Amino acid sequence: MATGMGHTIGSQHLALREQVLAELRRRIVDGDYPPGQRLTEERLAADFGVSRNPVREALRVVEADGLVTMVPRKGAVVATPDASTVADLFAVRSSLETVAARMAAERATPQDVAALRSLLDDARRATEEDDLSRVAQLNSDLHLRVIEISGNRWLSSISAALYLHVHWIFRIGAAHRAPHSWQEHIRLVDAIEAHDPDEAEAAAHAHVAAAAQAAVDNLEDAG
């Protein structure tokens, strides 16, 4: 069965449901389905080349994720982040990332720093090429790598759900944030390489604060 997802859907129901859910999440957070767009079961089933049942199940999950809202007489609509959502998200993100940055500066190996530098180089190229989807993905990859380097498994566990939304909000305003974000990441990685926990924590705090303000500004401009 052709799918429109770039790969063959598995025959088992559980595998099918998980693949549809993963693709629906990806298309929302990458902006293929932008905020405000109506998502009917019929349209999604056609997009993915599947029946409506796994689509219906996936819509329930992304509604619980906060990526979709159910609107009377319209059905499922891609959610639009509001100021309250952004404030709550970035409050948690600031706490998580400052701790992770500090611990990463204490624990990073030369191999860890090389991996971060490679991500920075990739992000620079993607920014120069105006590949905003790639920039957004690399933004998440770098932060998740810092969290991994911290060595704290609880930070890694918590970050999984958080970064679905971080990626989504970054992608919405990526055109404005990309060059600034890259420069802020350089400061963070420099501090980690220098094994300077105070500077790493300060860099992470400043970066998240700038990202939060940019997200709020973007919402105001859209409004």
Image: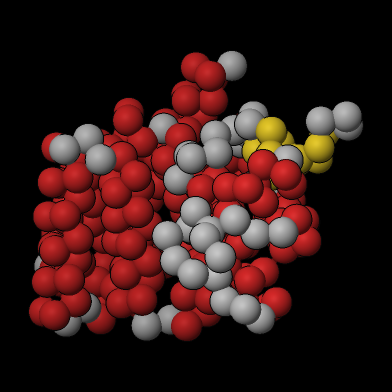
**Residue 193 percent location from the top left of the image:** 14, 68
Farthest residue toward the right? 72
Q: Nearer the viewer, residue 7 or 153?
A: 7
Question: On the picture, is 215 further left or further right than 100?
Answer: right
Residue 91 visible in the current orientation:
no
Q: Which residue is at 51% across, 48% downward?
A: 27
Image height of 200 relative to 156, above or below:
above
Number of numbered markers: 0
**Residue 214 percent location from the top left of the image:** 42, 31
Question: On the picture, is 195 further left or further right than 93?
Answer: left
Q: Which residue is at 48% across, 40% downward?
A: 32
Q: Which residue is at 55% across, 70% downward?
A: 9
Image height of 115 relative to 172, above or below:
below
Scheme by which the image is coloured: secondary structure
Q: Nearer the viewer, residue 31 or 209?
A: 31
Q: Nearer the viewer, residue 148 or 197?
A: 148
Quarter of the figure with residue 64 = bottom right
Image height of 46 relative to 195, above or below:
above
Farthest residue toward the front? 1
Question: On the picture, is 50 further left or further right than 177?
Answer: right
Q: Nearer the viewer, residue 167 or 24?
A: 24
**Residue 77 percent location from the top left of the image:** 71, 36
**Residue 179 percent location from the top left of the image:** 22, 36
Please state, as top left, top right, bottom left or bottom right, where the N terminus lies in the image.
bottom right
Image height of 98 relative to 177, above or below:
below
Q: Which residue is at 13% across, 80% downward?
A: 111
Residue 16 visible in the current orientation:
yes
Please state, as top left, top right, bottom left or bottom right, where the C terminus lies in the image.
top right
